[in-house]
Amino acid sequence: MLGAVLFAWLAYSIYTQVLTKADLQTSLRQMLSTLRNKGGIALVVVLIGMLFNWGLEARKWQMLVKPLQKISFLRAFSAVLSGVSFSINTPNRIGEYGGRVLYLKNNRSKLKAIAATMVGSFSQLIVTIIFGLIGLMYYISKFTLVKGDNHFSSGFWEKILLGVLTVICVLIILLYFRLQIIVAIFEKIPFLRKARVFIQIIVRYSAGDLERLLLLSACRYMVFSAQYLILLDSLGVEMHWWQGFLMNAVIYLVMALVPTIAIAELGLRGKVSLYFMGLLSANSPAIIAATVGIWCINLLLPAILGSVLLLGIKIFKEK
């Protein structure tokens, strides 16, 4: 309920912001003209990118659950899509874990797989923060979010934020390569001790495994970043691709740090994209169209496919 209200408020805010744009008609004409020229090819490329995006995530999950159960890439891919369908209405997509583990055989493996899946999410978060920090450094050097006052200069609070996030990033990376610390915490806290057996899988990954997960996460990041930039270009948003990549990195950083659910995420993503991408281009209708488009292609479409696959899993079990 709260997510729907938040989405409605953000959507209305975006609507009024776009509607009051002075050259709205010009922007719409430019968007439609560019879309006619590039739209078909761009859509095909972005759809193929969606398969690569979730395919890389499936490969990560296949690696993560290997100590529990060897599964084929196709089964891992189906599990990932089913996880997306579960996550669509849960805070920060935590339902994703429940959707994936349905594809494993015994219940003990399913519980352990949740901890394994979190390691994959951990690797993706690290990549998001690293690229986000690079984007934030570019943003701070070119733009100002908070104006200066009598006590602090312009950009002061952005630099504080950059410093805090850098420290957090370093700590997260250290923890990522020392996952045994998490197991040790579970051993020392009485009410968590019984759950220790389900998280011990996280110490079975070697440094090489963790590095490969980071590499796959970085490749996936490049894929969904490229998807968004391609959509922006096909809709007539003119900017240098590297500037768009860096500002998009800040958008992903904000989205990673702000807790939300998928339906509200669309409104929040639109609002955040309008601000950061709006610094590079005044074509706000196209920015919103690309944001909605990438959300539908990378989240809504996989969720629909995952729901169909879940139906197949249910029928299989009944037989």
Image (cartoon, rainbow, N blue to C red):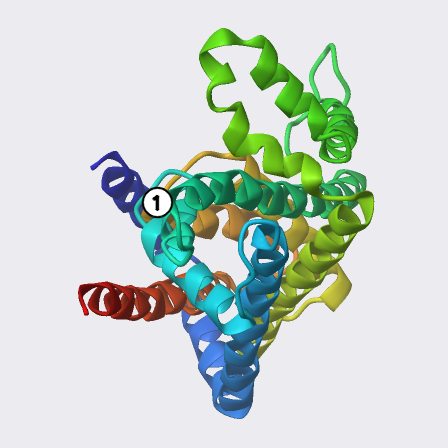
Tag 1: Cα neighbours inside 10 Å, few (<14), some, or many (≥20)?
many
Quarter the C terminus occupies: bottom left
Residue 235 lies left or right of residue 141; in this view the side is: left
Q: Position of residue 115 (x, y in %)?
A: 53, 38
Q: Which residue is mark 1?
A: 264
In the depicted view, which residue is nearer to us: 113 or 139? Answer: 113
**Quarter-of-image position of residue 61:** bottom right
Q: Is residue 193 above or below residue 294?
A: above
In the depicted view, which residue is nearer to us: 120 or 110? Answer: 110
- The answer to whether residue 273 is seen in the rendering is yes
Which residue does the image show at 32% across and 69% down from the upper left? 309
In the depicted view, which residue is nearer to us: 294 or 181? Answer: 181
Q: Is residue 163 above or below residue 309?
A: above
Q: Position of residue 205 (x, y in %)?
A: 71, 43
Q: How many marks?
A: 1
**Quarter-of-image position of residue 201:** top right
What amino acid is labelled 1 in the image? Ala
Q: Position of residue 193 (x, y in %)?
A: 51, 16
Residue 46 lies left or right of residue 158; in this view the side is: left
Quarter the N terminus occupies: top left
In the depicted view, which residue is nearer to us: 216 or 258? Answer: 216
Residue 136 lies left or right of residue 284; in this view the side is: right
Which residue does the image show at 55% across and 89% down from the upper left? 41
Which residue does the image show at 65% across and 62% down from the upper left? 220
- The answer to whether residue 240 is seen in the rendering is no
- Where disc 1 sits, the SS reads helix
Q: Position of residue 73 (x, y in %)?
A: 55, 70
